[in-house]
Amino acid sequence: MTEEEKKEEVKEEEAEEVTSKPEESKKEKKKGMDGKTQFLLMGGAILFVIYLTFFVSTVAEPAVFGLKPAYFILLISVGLSLFVTIVYKLLTDQALLHEYRDQIKKYQAQMKDFKDEPEKMGEVNKKAMEVNMKMMKQNLKPMLVTILPFFAIFGWLRGVYDSTLVIPLSFHVPLSGLATGLGWIGTYIIFSMIFTTVFRKLMKVV
C-alpha cells in the first residue's frame, strides 16, 4: 500500500468518525429524553392517584363482610401486597434488576472508600444515579398496571373508614380528651410493608 493510499484511508476513517459522532449524540439524547419522559410519567401518575385517593369525594357502601376494620384492612393488605409482587415478578427482568442492585451496592461501598476524595466520590455517585434510573425504567410498567386498582381500593377504603380509628391506642392526647390510634391508611402501610417484604423474599423479587 502506497503512502497516498494510506493517507486516503486515514481521511476516510476520520470522515466516518465525524459523521458517526452526531448520530451517536442523537442516540444519547434520545435515550436521555426517554428516561426523563418515563420519570415524569411515573411521578405524574403517583401525584394523580394521591389527588384522586385523598382529595376527591368518593361514594362507598360500608360493606366489610362483618369483619372488624383491622381484620378487613389486614386482608386487603395481604391481597394487594401479593398482587403487586406477582405483577413486578412478571413484568420486570428480575435477573437484570438483581444485577443493578449488586452494582449499586458496589458503588455505595466505593463511595465510603472515597469519602475523603470528593471528585472520585462524585464520579461514583453519578454512576450509581444512572443505575437507579435504569431500575426506575424497569419498574415503570408494573407501577402503571397496579396504580388503577390501588386508586379504586384506596378511594373505597377512605369512604368506609375515613373517620375510624382502626387500631385504637391505650393513651389519650393530653388536655384534648381525644383518643389516639391508627386510621385506615396508617394501618394499611404497616401491614403492607410487612407482607410486601415477606412476599418479595419468598418470590425473590427485587
Image (spheres, rainbow, N blue to C red):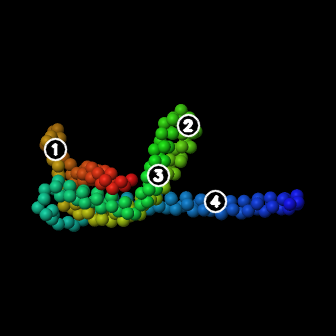
Counting from the top left corner in percent of width and height, residue 86 is at 33, 61
Counting from the top left corner in percent of width and height, residue 13 is at 76, 60
Q: Which of pointers 4 and 2 lies earlier in the amino acid sequence?
A: 4
Q: Which of pointers 3 and 4 lies earlier in the amino acid sequence?
A: 4
Which mark is on residue 169? 1
Quick one: SS at disc 4?
A: helix
Q: Which of pointers 1 and 3 lies earlier in the amino acid sequence?
A: 3
What is the C-alpha distance between the residues marked 3 and 4? 27 Å
Residue on which disc 2 sits: 118
What is the C-alpha distance between the residues marked 4 and 2? 28 Å
Residue on which disc 3 sits: 99
Counting from the top left corner in percent of width and height, residue 105 is at 45, 44
Quick one: SS at disc 1?
A: strand
Q: Which of pointers 2 and 1 lies earlier in the amino acid sequence?
A: 2
Structural crowding at the residue carrying mark 2, measured as other residues with C-alpha within 10 Å and reported as few (<14), some (14–19) or many (≥20) = few
What is the C-alpha distance between the residues marked 1 and 3? 43 Å
Q: Amino acid at mark 1?
A: Leu
Residue at the spot x=58%, y=39% of the render? 119
Q: Which of pointers 2 and 3 lies earlier in the amino acid sequence?
A: 3
| Marks 3, 4: nearer the viewer | 3
Q: Which of pointers 1 and 4 lies earlier in the amino acid sequence?
A: 4
Specify whether residue 167 is in view. yes
Q: Amino acid at mark 4?
A: Ser
Q: Quadrant of residue 69?
A: bottom left
Which mark is on residue 131? none
Left or right of residue 157: residue 119: right
Q: Amino acid at mark 2?
A: Pro
What is the C-alpha distance between the residues marked 2 and 1? 48 Å
Which mark is on residue 25? 4
Q: Amino acid at mark 3?
A: Glu
